[in-house]
Image (cartoon, rainbow, N blue to C red):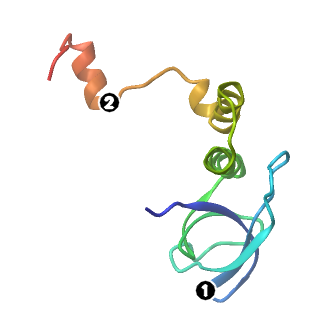
Amino acid sequence: MCLGIPMKVLRCEGGMALCEVEPRAGAQQQEVRQEQVDTILVPDARAGDYLLVFMGIARSRMEQAEAHRLQDALQALATLATTQVDAGMAEHIVTHGFADLCAAPPRLPPHLQAAFDAGQTEA
């Protein structure tokens, strides 16, 4: 499985950009990581932009808030995978790391919502 990592562009040189994963406030054991990223799919990337990076290749630009939400979620997963915590702490980690999902009501995909709205209850 490949995970996209949000990274901030520090500087661009040709078709490459020096990017870093910004440490988040309160993140445990998160070091600043920099790497050269191929920007062929995001040729207009500029210093200060946030990019979604897969295996060293920038796939898309993202807003700072979206990058921070994704960093929080990835940090929550890393913490749960590497740290033994009790149920209360796990709930806190999930609630913080996935705040945008926890605060939103459940949503069905549009095709299932249409079927539900039409009264269909079985496939």
Amino acid type, label 1: Gly
> Going 52% across and 60% down the picture, which residue do you hit?
3
Q: Looking at the picture, tell me which residue is in the foreground, 53 or 49.
A: 53
Pointer 1 residue: 15
Secondary-structure class at tag 1: loop
Q: Position of residue 37 (x, y in %)?
A: 63, 79
Quarter in which the N terminus is drawn: bottom left
Q: Is 36 left or right of 52, judged from the image as shown? A: right
> Going 42% across and 25% down the picture, which residue do you hit?
107
Amino acid type, label 2: Pro
In the displayed orientation, state which residue is furthest to the left: 123
> Going 68% across and 64% down the picture, which residue do you hit?
7
Q: Is residue 61 above or below residue 90?
A: below
Task: Answer whether residue 104 is visible to the viewer in this image.
Answer: yes
Q: Looking at the picture, tell me which residue is in the foreground, 46 or 25.
A: 25
Earlier-in-chain disc, 2 versus 1: 1
Q: Is 53 left or right of 93, judged from the image as shown? A: left
Q: Is residue 119 above or below residue 90?
A: above
Secondary-structure class at tag 2: helix
Pointer 2 residue: 110
